[in-house]
Image (cartoon, helix red, strand yellow):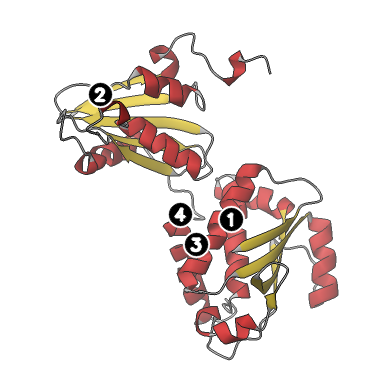
Amino acid sequence: MILEIEDELQLLDEQDRALMQRCAGSAKAAEGVSVPLAVYVRIVDDGEIQTINREQRGKDASTDVLSFPTVNYPKGKTAGSCEKLLRREYDPETGACHLGDIIISMDHVRAQAAEYGHSERRETGYLLTHGLFHLMGYDHMTDGDKPVMRAMEEKALAAIGLTREEIAVTDEKLLETAVGMLAYSYVPYSHYAVGAALLAKDGRVFTGCNVENAAYGNTMCAERTALFKAVSEGAREFEAIAIAARGSAPFPCGACRQSLYEFAPDLRVMVTWDGNVRRTTLRALLPEGFGPSSLDI
């Protein structure tokens, strides 16, 4: 899905945009739409969204998100079953069918993120997803419609590891997740399986296992598997990592310490084996580490 984002106030960063793009792709997949789609997204403050709400809907009040679909769906139908209607909105300039417009107030994003106790980025992703399902024919005005729309939102958000409600990830849960990843390790040569679970500051958890190779130098450690997966999904800030093995304490190798230090010098590190747990920090494991701040650029 193509997102045409207008952000005159420059309130979004690259990670915000990356998460919004993931949310859009997941919403499209959840609905099962096969035709290419495009959506115009405008980022505003409370004053501007109140003006739009008054002029377009006759409601003189600010709100968190407004959606203006281009398609008039038949009663009981949504985008997934109306692709012929969607094709009527084809725009040759974008090469996609224009689904509609979404307006998001960042003032409401900040307030609601504080209320729910999670990041503004997470709230932005949720509001975009909410708006997208409005554009695809869903509503929440009746008791019957609301749970259907909410289920679709949760389906799309869960597919990318994101929910509106912040679910606290305890150390115990992170360790348990790392242990679970041992089952996926590919270790025909060393027979030393390692699992990892990396907690991002936005609440997402990224997992990894070690993957060996007959050309030994191509082997990838569990920690870097989790890290590279996280970075490829837009995460850049991390709080903790849990690493699991059997037989001995799986402290990260030098390459993993350096790779993690690039993004999280203050990372908490937990290792577990055979029921034992040791806790330390990345700075303790890599004193005087070399990172981005070391470069005079």
Labelled disc at residue 21: 1
- Distance from Cα at disc 3 to Cα at disc 4: 7 Å
Residue bearing the label numbered 4:
160
Q: Which mark is residue 252?
A: none
Residue 118 appears in view:
yes
Badge 3 element: helix
Asked whether 168 or 70 is in front, the reply is 70
Q: Which residue: 77% across, 62% down?
A: 62
Q: How far apart are marks 1 and 2 (CA)?
A: 36 Å
Picture disc at residue 26: 3
Crowding near the residue tagged with mark 4, few <14, some 14–19, many ≥20 C-alpha atoms within 10 Å: some
Residue 83, located in which quarter of the rendered image?
Answer: bottom right
Location of mark 2 (residue): 250
**Quadrant position of residue 283:** top left
| Disc 2 to disc 4: CB gap under 8 Å | no
Residue 162 in picture, x, y percent from top left: 48, 53
For badge 4, the amino acid type reads Ile
